[in-house]
Amino acid sequence: MNSKTLHTLEFDKIIALLEERAVSAPGKALCHALAPMTDLREIERAQAETEAALSRIRMKGELRLAGLRDVSASLKRLDVGGTLSTAELYAISSLLDLSERARNYGAHEEEENPDALESAFTALSLLPRENRELKRCILSEELVSDHASPELARIRRQMKTADERMHSALQEEINRHKSYLMDTIVTMRNGSYCLAVKSEFKTKLPGVVHDQSSTGSTVFIEPLVAVRLNNEYRELTLAEQQEIAKILTALSAMLAPFTAELLANQKILATLDFVFAKARLASSMQASKPLFNTERIVEIKDGRHPLIPKDKVVPISIWLGQEFSLLIITGPNTGGKTVSLKTVGLFTLMGQAGLHIPAFQGSRLAVFRDVFADIGDEQSIEQSLSTFSGHMKNVVEILDAADGDSLCLFDELGAGTDPTEGAALAIAILSFLKNIGARTVATTHYSELKVYALTTKGVENASCEFDVATLRPTYRLLIGIPGKSNAFAISQKLGLPNYIIEDAKNHIEQNDAAFEDLLTRLEADRRTIEAERKEILAYRAEIEELKNRHEKADQNLDERKERILEKARAEAERILSEAKESADQSIRRINRLSADSGLLRELEKERSGLRDKLKSVEKTAPKKKAVKAAKPAVLHIGDSVRVLSMDHEAIVSTLPDKNNRLFVRMGVLRTQVSADDVVLIEEDAAVSKGAKQSRSGGAPSFGKASHISPEINLIGKTVDEALGELDKYLDDALLAHLNSVRVIHGRGTGALKKGLLAWLKKQPYVKKCEDAHFDDGGEAVTVVTFR
C-alpha cells in the first residue's frame, strides 16, 4: 500500500491510538507494524478476530496480559545449552502464568460454534509441572528461594548465624571502646563493617583502617574480630553463589526441551494483546464490522471520521461502485468535502487492516490493491514547485500506477491554474480513471465538472450542504445534487457592498449564471421535499399513535365486558349455591317428616334433578380461560401457559429461539417445548380484582401470589429501579410460599448484580444467594433461597 497515502489519510494516527490500547511491548510492536492487506481471506480473518475479541470483552470482561515480555533471546540461549539468570527464569514463569490465565479466559464449555480466537487460546502450552518448580525456586527477579535446595537452605542458615555473630562481636567492641569512638553506629566501608574511631585513639583499636573523614578527625577501622568473621561470611557467600548457579543450571536444563512451546506461547499472547487492542479501539469508537465485497462497491452508512471529536463530528453516508464509479463532490470551502474524501479513504485502509470502522452496522467496503490520495497543499519551495505543479506531480504518479483495483481520491482537482484549462484537465483525468475502471472521488469548485457529472453515465454529483442564513456548513453529504460555492451570498453576509456583488454577477457568463440559478432552484426544491417528507413522517406517526390508542380502547372495552360477565357469573353462582343449600335443608326436613310415607322416593328423585341442574350452571362460570395459541412475539418470561401435549400448566422461563422452542417450568421440572404446543392463560377476573384490592390496602388476597413467576427479569434497569421491582416481587414470592426464586440481571459491567447482592444480603428472610447453574444462566442469574 502506498506509504504516502497512509500518511495523507492519517492512518499513522489510527495506529498510534491502537498502540495506546495494547498492554505489552510485544503487542505494541504488532500494533505499530499493522498495515492494510489486499487478500480478502486474510482481511476477513482479521475482522473476525476483532469481532470475537469485542464479543469476549462484552461477555467476560478484559483479558489482562500486562507484564508480557520478550523472552526470545533467553530461549535462544537455552537452545545452545546456556544457563539463564534469575530474572530470565522469573520472566519465563510469568509467561507461563499469563498463558494459564489466557487459557482459562478463552475456555468455552460446550461451545458448538467456536469463534475466530478459540484455536489461539487452545494452542497455548501450560507446562504446569515446570512452572510449579520455577515458582518454588524463584521468588522474584533477584531472589532464589531458600527451599530451592537443601544445601542452599543450610548455607543461608549458616550465613544468618554468622551475621548475628558479627553484630554481637561489633556490639561488644563498641561497648569496650566506647570512649574512643566518634559514634556508636556501625558503618560499611569497602564492603566491611567498620567503627568510627577518633583519630587520636586509632592505635587503641586493633584492626584494619579502611577510610577516614574529610577533616581527618575520624578514622573508620574494621576490628580484627570483624575481619575474621567477615572472611567466614564471604566464604559462605561464595558457597551460596555456587549453589544458586547449580539451581539455575538445573532449572535451565529443565526448560530446554520446551523452547518451541514457550516461543509459540509468547507469539500467541502478543497476537492476543494486539487483537484485543483492536477490539478496545473499536469499542471506544463505537465501531462496527464492515462487510467486504469483490464487486468494488463502497457503501458507508453514517460514517464518523475517527479523528474528529465525537461531539463535533457529523455522520455522512456515501456510496460508490454500483450505479456510478466516479463521484464529484462540490460545495463551499470548509463545508466538509475534504473530510468526506478522507473518511472514504481512511475507512478503506482501516477495514483492510482488520479494524472495525465507526459507521452504522451493515456498511460495505471493497478490497483495493492500492489507495491513492492527492489531498492538501503540495506547494514546495525547496523543489521550486507551485501548488498546481505539486498537485500535478502527484496526479502523474497516480495515473501511472492506478488500475481497475484502485481507489483514487482528489481534493480540488485542477485547482491552482487557469479555471478553464484546470477544468478541462480535471475532466480528462477523471475520464481516464473512469475508463480503466478505478473507483474515484474528487472535490471541485468548477461548474464544468458539475455539468460533466450530470451528462456522463457512471458519474454522479454530490454536494456538502451549506446554510447561507447562518454562514455555517451542515456537513451533510447529499448525493445526486450538485452544490453551489455560494461565494456571492457569503460575501454579502460578510459585508461586501451590493454594488460590487452586482458588478461581479455581470462578469459571469450567461450560461454559468443560468446553471447556478438551476442549482439554486434544485436546492430549494430539495429543501421543500425534505420538509414535506418530515411532515409526512410526522403525520404517519400521529396516525399510528391514534390507531394504537383506538386498539387499546377496544381492548379495554373487551376487558370491561369480560369483567361484567364474570361478575354476573359469580353472582349467579352465589345465588345458585344459596338456593342449593336452602333446597337441601328443606328436603332433609321433609325426609324426616315423611320417612314412613311413600313420598321419599319422589323427593329423592326431585333432589337429584335439582343438583344436576346446579352442577350444569356451575360449569358455565370457568375460573381460567385459554386463548388462541400465542405467537413467539407476545410471549413474555413469567407468563402462565398450558402445555397442550401434557395438559399441564407451566411458567415461561425463556423466549422462543430460532427453532421456535422455549423452556417452561412445571413446579420443579424445567423442560423444553415447542411454542406451538402452548397457549396463554388469562387469570380469573376475580383473582385479578383480589390482587388489586390487596395492593390498595384492602383485605389481603393471595390470588396474585398463587400465580407468581419463579423468576424476575431486571436486565437494562438501574440499581434503584431494579431494587424497587425486586422488593415488591419478593413480597409476592414469600406470600406464594416459594422456597427460592431466580433474579435475572445479566452480566454487563456487573454494577447491577453487585447492587442487588448487597441489598439482598441485608434482608432477614434471605437465606443465601448464589449464581445459577451454567446451563441455567450462570453468572447472569442469581438464585435467592428463602429461610
Image: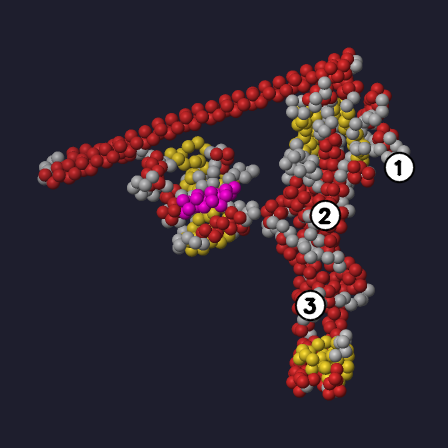
The residue range painted magenta reads 710-730
Which of discs 1 and 3 lies nearer the camera? The answer is 1
**Residue position marked by numbered label 1 in the rendering:** 382
Above/below status of 198 relative to 656 = below
Mark on residue 19? 2
Q: Residue at x 52, y 24 (%)?
A: 541
Q: Residues within 10 Å of mark 2 (few under 14, many from 20)?
A: many
- Taking depth in this image into account, of 557 and 311 the one nearest to the observer is 311
The x, y position of residue 701, in whole percent, is 32, 42
Q: Amino acid at mark 1?
A: Glu
Left/right of residue 744 with respect to residue 433 in the rendered view: left
Which of discs 1 and 2 lies nearer the camera? The answer is 1
Q: Residues within 10 Å of mark 3 (few under 14, many from 20)?
A: many
The x, y position of residue 213, in whole percent, is 75, 76
Q: Residue at x 60, y 45 (%)?
A: 58
Q: CA distance from mark 1 to mark 2?
A: 34 Å
Look at the numbered disc 2 and give the secondary structure of its residue: helix
- Give the image's coloring scheme: secondary structure
Q: Residues within 10 Å of mark 1 (few under 14, many from 20)?
A: few
Which is more N-terminal, label 3 or label 2? 2
Q: Residue at x 60, y 20 (%)?
A: 531
Left/right of residue 535 with respect to residue 6 in the rendered view: left
Q: Which of the image's four quarters has the N terminus?
A: top right
- Taking depth in this image into account, of 585 and 111 the one nearest to the observer is 111
Q: CA distance from mark 2 to mark 3?
A: 32 Å
Q: Is residue 238 visible?
A: no
Question: In the rendered picture of this protein, how many numbered marks are placed on residues?
Answer: 3
Look at the numbered disc 3 and give the secondary structure of its residue: loop
Left/right of residue 778 with respect to residue 68 in the rendered view: left
Q: Amino acid at mark 3?
A: Ile
Q: Which of the image's four quarters has the C terminus?
A: bottom left
